[in-house]
Amino acid sequence: MRILIAIGMLLCSLVSVKHALHMFQQNRYELTRYTSWMKANLRVLTENLPVILCGAFGMAASLVLKDMALKLTVFGLSLAAGILALLKERRASYIKPLVYTDRVKRQIAVTAVLLIALVWFFSGDPFRTAYGLGIICMAVLPWLLIYLMALITSPIEKAVQNWYLNDAKRILREHTNLIKIGITGSYGKTSTKNVMQAVLSERFNSLMTPASYNTPMGITRTVRGMLKPIHQVFVCEMGADKVGDITELMEFVHPQIGVVTSIGPQHLQTFGSQENITREKMQMIELLPSDGLGIMNYDNELIRNWKLKNSVQTVSYAIDYEHADYRAADIRYSSAGSSFTLIHGDETYQFETKLLGKLNILNILSAIAASRYLGVDWKTIQRAVRSMKQVEHRLEQKKINGYNFIDDAFNANPSGAAMALDVLSGMPGTRYIVTPGMIDLGEKQDEINRSFGRQMKDKADVVILVGAKQTQSIVQGLSESGFDMDHVHVVDHVKEAFALIYRDAEKTDTILLENDLPDAFNN
């Protein structure tokens, strides 16, 4: 009988195990972040409580009942409850599902051993005779099991990472003629990287880090798996969410050209202060070689006011700051994209692009600055800018079921969100915005989201907010601005937001999707 009880416990705990591993991955395998998430989401630990209680009752009843047939029937029903939970989990959809990397597979193996040991323990006395107490324990303990699993696997992961990292460093050292461009910023990194790649690939055999591969291991995978001797340029996105990250990546890649796209309160919770963020991001320029080039966005006050200690050559780009080396003026938007005039000293050049928004134009300016430094002629740059594709999920115009969407779903930030609203304000028809607000902004998150709500006045006609708790500050900002609150809708899930769109919007209207919401924050 103990084996049957152990099987039941195992089934009732598997969903919790998967959820715990999923949230550990979304919190970047960092126990401090995982702990903070656990404190803020305690209710998730008991989300399967009805199934757990059903299983516990069935197990307890199977022990008390005397008739073996009835005992097995009740036991089977309790097992069915656990199986139903697994089937429900298989059908569940996540914004960012658990990715079964080699690291996760190792974590699963260790967790499985620990789980089986715990199941065997809790299936025996005194838990077996405590009316299913063991089952309830096994549904909660997997969340705590992550700590023990991380303690066991940490030395293994560190050794594996160091080996791969050192091999990637060797490859970069041996590629002596490679031009390496590092890109960092609180936001705009990935868009800038894509734009930079589109322009430089017109002239060079260029490689960029894919997707958001901006961590040491992401860059390592790119170097080891994609970098070839024929590549002339390596465009490398560098992310940071704590002090020391950019310094570590600069010592790894050693770029000759560095771009700082922006500095703001992104990841304020992990950095601790805006001063720490600014100092860390500016290491991109401070650690460049003396014969390199620093490219900086002078519309950003924190970047413009930084007192650079490195004697490296620098150039600036901007839209609003009039004294920048590369400046865009006379910006116009349409359903076909954007156009602007580039001002460089006494020279002016006309540019057209499918991309929308000031942020994308700033990204183009940084790519122009790098291209001119590397000797690319103006006509080639103009052609590249005109033909480059829209960047996925970054003010990307698209048709969904015949409706006009502007997809700006990639991790909104205060500056990018404001620019997205500016683009929306100039679009035809009724203007909709669908957003869960901004996340991971520490103690300033409520203030920033409240300001975001105020900015929607006169730029959006209908607001659909995803998540009542998450968006309370946006509602406050909307109310303070005098927005017509009859046109504000709060829903629990993205599917409900789309249902509202398809019910109320016309095909001539415009819908802005502003910010994605990882499942770690969607609870």
Image (cartoon, rainbow, N blue to C red):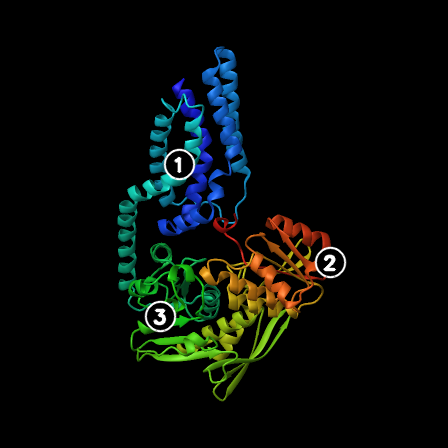
Residue at far top of view? 67
At label 1, the amino acid type is Leu
Residue situated in front as seen by the camera: 308 or 437 = 437
Q: CA distance from mark 3 to mark 1?
A: 41 Å
Q: CA distance from mark 1 to mark 2?
A: 50 Å
Mark with earlier residue (2, 3): 3
Asked whether disc 3 touches disc 1, contact meaning CB atoms under 8 Å apart, the reply is no
At label 2, the amino acid type is Glu
Q: Is residue 140 left or right of residue 407?
A: left
Q: Is residue 297 visible?
A: no
Q: Is residue 485 left or right of residue 60?
A: right
Asked whether disc 2 touches disc 3, contact meaning CB atoms under 8 Å apart, the reply is no
At label 3, the amino acid type is Arg
Q: Is residue 41 left or right of residue 149?
A: right
User: Where residue 141 is drawn, which disc sits there?
Assistant: 1
Residue situated in front as seen by the camera: 384 or 237 = 237
* Residue in the image at 49% along x and 61% along y: 445
| 1 or 2: mark nearer the eye | 1
- Rendered view: 106 above or below 356: above
Please provide percent x and percent y for residue 348: 53, 85
Q: CA distance from mark 2 to mark 3?
A: 47 Å
Kindly indicate the quadrant of the structure image that contains residue 167.
bottom left
Residue at far bottom of view? 346
> Residue under circle 2?
506
Please provide percent x and percent y for residue 81: 52, 28
> Residue under circle 3?
279
Mark with earlier residue (3, 1): 1
Where is the N terminus found, in terms of image quarters?
Answer: top left
Kindly indicate the quadrant of the structure image that contains residue 138.
top left
- Rendered view: 52 above or below 513: above
